[in-house]
Amino acid sequence: MPGFVLEETFPLARYQNTVGFNKINDNFIISLNTLTAAATATQTATDQTLEGADHADHVLVTVQSEGIKLYDTTMQKCLKSWTIPPGLVLGQPALYCPAVADDSQSYTYVLIDSGSDITAQEQRKTVWLWKSNQDDNSDKTVKKFDQRIQSLHAPASLHGNVILVNENGSIDLVCKDLDRHTTNYKAQADEKVIWSTNFTTTNSHIRPCCVPNSMAPANSTIVATVVQHAKGYSLNLHHINEERRSIHLLANIEMAIKDTPVSITFDSTPGIVTVLESSGAWTVYQLSLKHRMANKLSATLTQQLQRQFPKEQVYHKTNGALASTAMLPGNFVALITPRPKQKDFLLSIWDVKYGTLQAQQSIQPENLPDHGATQCHVDVLQNSHLAVSFATLSAKSGKSKKSMADTKSVVLLCPYFHQPMSLLTAMNKMRATSTFLGMDADKYEDQSTVGYTRSGQSAVVRHQLDSYTDDDDAYTQWVQQLEKSQQAEQKTITSLLACKNSASLLAAFMAHVGVPESVWQRDDEPISNPGAKLDKDRTYFKKLYNEFYLDQTKHGLSSELVTQVISRIFSKTKAGSADDTYWCPVVVVYLMAKQQLRNSFVKGGLMSALMERNAWPLVPLALRSIPDLPERDLIKVIRELVALAKAQPQIWKGRSIEYIRRVVETPHNDVFLQQAVKRLTIEELPALLECLVIWLKDPQTKNIRIQESVKRRNNLNEFANAFFDIHFPTIILEPSLHPLIEQLGAVLDGMVEQMTELDGLYGLVAPFEREEKLHQKAKATIFEEQEERKGAPAADKSLARVTRVNYGGKEGIPVYRADGLAF
């Protein structure tokens, strides 16, 4: 089903510094940029995507008074860094252009806003440039321009060029080295640019774009700016023509913005523009460009929807913008806002088409002080991650006259997932209605079914259809049967929910599904030893699960009945106590065995609810039968088992390994597993490494033997690969883990040696296997010939053809012989 999922955040980097407060003020910048790889004019959109795939996990972090850091988000490792003096105020996040095929140098740009060494005439007119892999400030190049620069952009389609958008509305296209101007655009009116971006047009036949190819050819660069003038605000679109070396105004559209814009987003594919104003109003516009008579261009901005957010969470008179927005693929916008009362930040995802909330998550950054002005920013990365950055400035009085400020910054990454439902995916996931409902299509007299339809035929209503000749009577009978079945179902649900305790609920449910009391009744004596009780309960529920699973009797349980019963079973908050009135593990086992229980049926997730009730005997059954267990819940189970093994070693010292193995062998999604494994801390790593050593070291040991199932063995290998890929830096830097790694390496070397020996043995056995196959094939051929000759008349041997003998050996190797000749 379609849906948007926000995973838990994990930290990428933290910074702490002391700066001059009067210089930084509210212009403190901590933001991110994805890498911009330039493409040649002949590259298609697919080629550009493939070229940028090498840098999809890289992100550039710009921190005021700290510097510029290039991170690998997968390894959570800093690859490069460039130092910025604390006295400089940056004008925008740094821009990084990695090296492309025909250019071995990478370029890093940063716009200087102000500083102690920057005069008032030079503010926002100075750009620092680093080439190649140099990260020393002494090797930087300083370039100065005549106009105040609003932002820098590296267009993907203009190879070797950088776009400078100036505050007065003019645009300069300069080479990558910033040495010469390729072309420029002079402002037509008195205006001030407050926001800008650039995008590349696509082929309308392959992928749509808001700018038709009739106005700008495919692979053209468009610069979009929002400017403020005397009458208000407007959106300008500029087309950069590389062949003619010119920049011309493509469209100018007035915007109905009443208050100060806080954050603006733009999606070039559908032409969606969103504006968040200081009053809390969030407006979504639809951009439309069309040709009219006499080759005139018509450009309109139509308001699609508008929502109102609390003003105090969006803008502050002293601190400026508090909220931030970012456009996601698929008509979604990410919004981050502070909540002063709750002392946290709210990250929410909104659908710009319908204005509905898709997902939200509360974020409480660690190591940030409670006092001071905290700024937040959200960015979208290429590898399905949201980057949320926070910066807090706490002013303090220094010994000198200059006031200082302590700055603390943190960058968090939030993985997200969204898969829209299409007709093709729906057809691949749907099953036949009759099969899904448990109907027997060959038995019309089946009383358990209400009705079903076949392609090209009218509706079939049980076996009573033959007694009616009028379609109206058949339809009336079908409606009556449907209402009767629904009333009976509702009556059953009401009776089950009316039960006063777990015993009555268990008896009523089992009577409804037709399971006799002798099957599930348990009259065992209580056991005082917790470990023995855990093993006995697990054996009992496993046996019960197998009996329910092998029972072929079908009892139609609707989704409504299952969800209502499960909600009643997990209704109490005091899990595992005497107040947990409706706790019926036998009913849960029955629904698991019949494959009718899902993780989403339980509020907060089935696995979390089982762990809250200490229902560990049911955990292996849930891992076996529940298909929609999220990967983060699997990691949660592992962390809980490791904690129990440390807190209660007398119970879980040997049992936790078996339970963890069940979790590891559970089917999972590789992408989600990599994100979930990041939640493992340094405390859980030794336990998992020890488990891997035990599983591989002695496969014949009871209760810890690796299953022979290929699927489970592959799941174990995939989990181990994700585990080592994510936590490789931690394992290398932590000396206490090295002995376990050495043991694991020794075990793997032994396994590789055994496989090599077995492979050599197979080379000796293979010829015998081939000979046996040829022998069996020859026997089958002879048998077929004998069957064909049965009953046929006797053949005249004189008419038989002479059979030629082909002297030769097997496998194409000739056999030689020596003949003796007499003269």
Image: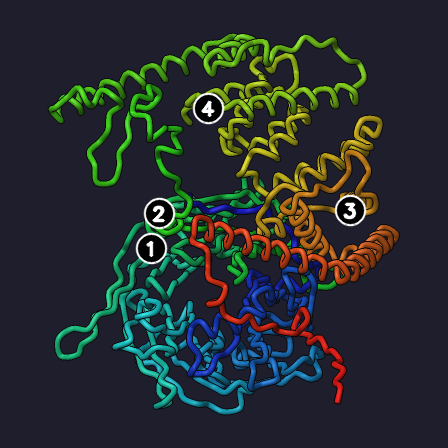
Question: For mark 1, what is the residue?
Answer: 284
Residues at marks 4 and 2, CA–CA distance in whole angstroms: 33 Å
Disc 3 and disc 4 in contact, CB within 8 angstroms: no
Question: Sequence-wise, which precedes: disc 3 or disc 4?
Answer: 4
- Identify the residue at image location x=47%, y=16%: 513
- Residue 662, given in percent of the width and then of the height, sits at 68, 37
* First reached walking from the N terminus: tag 2 or tag 1: 1
| Residue 499, horizontal then vertical, whole percent | 49, 9
Instruction: Tell me the number on the disc at residue 15.
Output: none
Q: Measure the alpha-carbon separation of dots 1 and 4.
A: 41 Å
Q: Nearer the viewer, residue 703 or 721?
A: 703
For the C terminus, give its image quadrant. Answer: bottom right
In contact (CB < 8 Å): disc 2 and disc 1: yes
Q: CA distance from mark 3 to mark 1?
A: 52 Å
Mark 3 vs mark 2: in front: 3
For label 1, the SS is strand
**x and y, in percent, of residue 277 in the image:** 39, 55
Which is closer to the viewer, label 1 or label 4?
A: 4
User: Disc 3 marks which amino acid?
Assistant: Leu
Q: Which mark is residue 692?
A: 3
Q: Quadrant of residue 284?
A: bottom left
